[in-house]
Amino acid sequence: MSKRNRTNRKVAFLLSIAFAVSTIIVPQTVSGAADYNYGEALQKGIMFYEFQRSGKLPDNMRTNWRGDSGMTDGADSGLDLTGGWYDAGDHVKFNLPMAYTATMLSWSVYENRSSYEKSGQLPYILDNIKWATDYLIKCHPSPNVYYYQVGDGGPDHNWWGPAECMQMKRPSYKVDSASPGSAVAGEAAAALAAASAIFKATDPTYSALCLKHAKELFAFADTTKSDTGYTAAASFYKSWSGFYDELTWASMWIYLATNDETYLKKAESYEPNWARENQSTTIKYKWAHCWDDKLMGALLLLARATDKPLYKECFERHLDFWTTGAGANRITYTPKGLAWLDTWGSLRYATTEGFLGSVYAEWSGADASKAATYKSFAKSQIDYALGSAGRSFVVGFGTNPPEHPHHRTAHGSWSDQDTVPDYHRHVLYGALVGGPNSSDGYKDEVKDFTANEVACDYNAGFVALLSYMVGKYGGTPIPDFNAIEKPTNEEFFVETSINGKGDNYIEIKSLTNNRSGWPAKVADKLSYRYYLDITEAINAGYKAEDIVVSTNYNDGGKASSLKPYDAEKNIYYVEVDFTGTKIYPGGQSNYKKEVQVRIAGPKDTKFWDNTNDFSFQGVAPQGETPKLNKYITVYDNGVKVFGDEPNGTTVPSPSSSVKPSGSPTSLPTNTPVPSGAPTVSSRPISGYVNGSGFKVELEGTQYYATSDTNGYFIINDVAPNSEGYTVKISKSGCLARRVTTKIPINYYSISISSKSNPIGLIPGDLNNDEAINIGDAILIAASSFSKLAVVNYEMDLNNDGVINMSDIIIIAQNFGKTSADYAPIYVPLPQG
């Protein structure tokens, strides 16, 4: 039988399965049966707020890739407005969503304090809330003045770089009696009142301070009842719902903090001003509780405080809309079960509504049958975010989590480009991304700020709901978890090539780089040393003083004359000093500075010899791109940060200067390790595979890399191992492949494949059992004939954007193959 006939029979066989499967598999709403570690998710969700911090960071930070930033905030107004949180993947401090976030986190403690205590997360959540409320207090220097924003969204969004290296102006904006902002001031009042309520037990002095500012801000907002002064944020966080929801919300929180019924009555008095559905007297219910509209949260608090039917009916109508339907009106549900409200931040709306549902359902005044529905809804939405739809939407958590969130500092670019590097240098643990479209479609791309943006308000309801889930279902945080990372690439170094040469000179083109990221920093005291051996000059009767150093092109450096390093051995160096020149990872002209250094003997001499110069061995030939030169040492304010010296002294592998509270432990074995660039003192394994997104790991270790858009990968800092390593190459939807190689002591690097001959993988293993079999056929048949949108991209085997007959044919062609069928790959041992 011909190969073609065999393939046709396989196709026919798989088609029969496909049609059979299609008759019994239909899109199902995701049930609440999935089991997730809610304790770990809560722990990481809280940690996200530490990555968002602005200002002078404390010593107990649990990460080493964030540093002090925004240290002159408020200077234009003569105030100290440092601190607070950056809003999202940018660096503006927008107080309306920031204060909302603080309120929501405080509300979660108010409702579920025991969950935080049980999980050991209470100190962390309180510390993060206080970080925000301390800032809000700074923003309120007098009763009727409130600074609501620091930073300008236009210039801020035009630059793609780490927070620590911002150079743009950061103006501060305020509202006052002449130009009021009732919504933003009212939300600040709510945040500080909620904080007062939860800090009363542990820090009564701070609680009283928060309450003082909350009352003053509320009075300011309530007296002015206008948003005419709230203008700077209009393109980003306009209060579309007006300010009466904030006034109701804030007065309820002051009531809960004080038990003063004056504020309860004040909250009720706003009812005539609450928004209604279009052309209706029905109180608006077909949206979500969020940074803009807090009416539903306020109604829940009013219902519990008064037990009045009006508030209960309004709030239940809202939750019914989100669950079973309110009359003919019901939220859209995706095929996999997400309650989907809007393109922007679909997951934050769903998880926030889940939290509101959980709070109401636990109230004794709630209808028992509806309470069960609301609890089920809450669990289904948090489980969707954590992975019940087939992937996690939380960075650093669960199966196939996002790796490319739209976040400048986590990405860690040095070139002001979201494509450089093509991986994220940092793991933004706990960040909830925006989420999928209404068909569950989602792509993990840094450019997609709709689906992959993260934000403080996104995590607010998410963390709040997790606190409920921990109390109800339990969960175990990772002991002593931290985000202390080992740098994945050199941060400071010099690249060199020959710019010109002659009988009596050498001219070196040098590019001094600052690609720092642990944390990123603006350096204005960098210098480097180029070492040379002048024995030939001494033997010809000349001295070091006869060697002339000059520069041709010079972008901010100052070159010295020869300085002795080991005069007895005739070893000297030229120092190029950039003191006063800012070099920082902020753009093409900022992260590297070029200096062309000429070192010349006396005129008409011909003794010059570069081959014995220590630094010359790392210089690229003339006409080639400058390459990293590890034989040039780099110093930051006199402290060596890179390179080898002629006597063999090297820079030790970097270690964190950050001392997190508790004893740092190793990260879990499934912790993502950013890849793509050589590390300090590395012994790398590298090579090419036939595409991007392939995981290349050393089995039995925590080391792995992900192939870039060119198929290139590199695993750094691999220890010598005479027994050999097994390199596993895998990607969901493909048969895994293994390569065994030994690591001799004296090697520098090993390449297991080349760009011209990359390692290929066979497509079709959809269930990742290292065989293409009936299980894969059933999976692809279910996805194809149920006519679902492409959400499991690994099933789109030919990458044509749809799961169809072509993919079934690929399964048929490779049916029966296993990982053991791959031909062995020969990897020659490198020579020392």
Image (cartoon, rainbow, N blue to C red):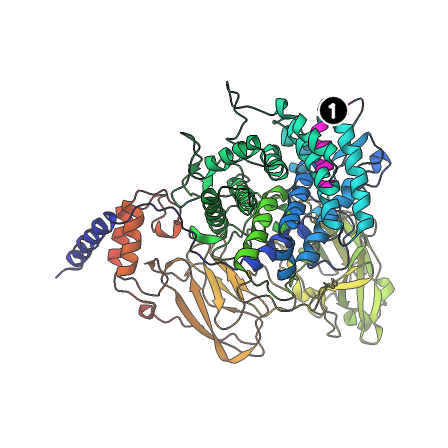
Q: Quadrant of residue 738?
A: bottom left
Q: In the displayed image of the protein, which residue is found farthest to the bottom?
A: 722
Left or right of 15, for residue 711: right
Report if residue 172 is visible in the image: no
**How far from the left and from the top, in percent, is residue 352?**
56, 42
Looking at the image, can residue 721 be seen? yes
| Chain part drawn in magenta | 179-193
Nearer to me, 797 or 222: 222
Residue 775 shown in magenta: no
Residue drawn at x 50%, y 31% as measured from the top left:
286
Going 28% across and 65% down the picture, which residue do you hit? 817
Judge whether 462 appears above or below 504 on screen: above
Residue tagged 1: 229
Could you tell me residue 535's position as x and y percent?
Answer: 78, 72
Q: Position of residue 9 (x, y in %)?
A: 16, 56
* Position above or below: 184 against 720: above
Which secondary structure, mark 1? loop
* Residue in the image at 73% along x and 38% along y: 254
The residue lying toward the viewer, choosing from 535 and 484, is: 484
Q: Position of residue 424 (x, y in %)?
A: 58, 53
Question: In this rendering, would 796 be left or right of 38?
Answer: left
Q: Main secondary structure of the magenta part?
A: helix
Task: Point out the residue furthest to the left here.
Answer: 1
User: Image check: 345 left or right of 239?
Assistant: left
Q: Is residue 185 magenta?
A: yes
Number of numbered callouts drawn: 1
User: Residue flagged by tag 1: what amino acid is it?
Assistant: Gly
Q: Is residue 302 left or right of residue 338?
A: right
Q: Nearer the viewer, residue 562 or 131?
A: 131
Circle 1 crowding by C-alpha within 10 Å: few under 14, some 14–19, many from 20:
some
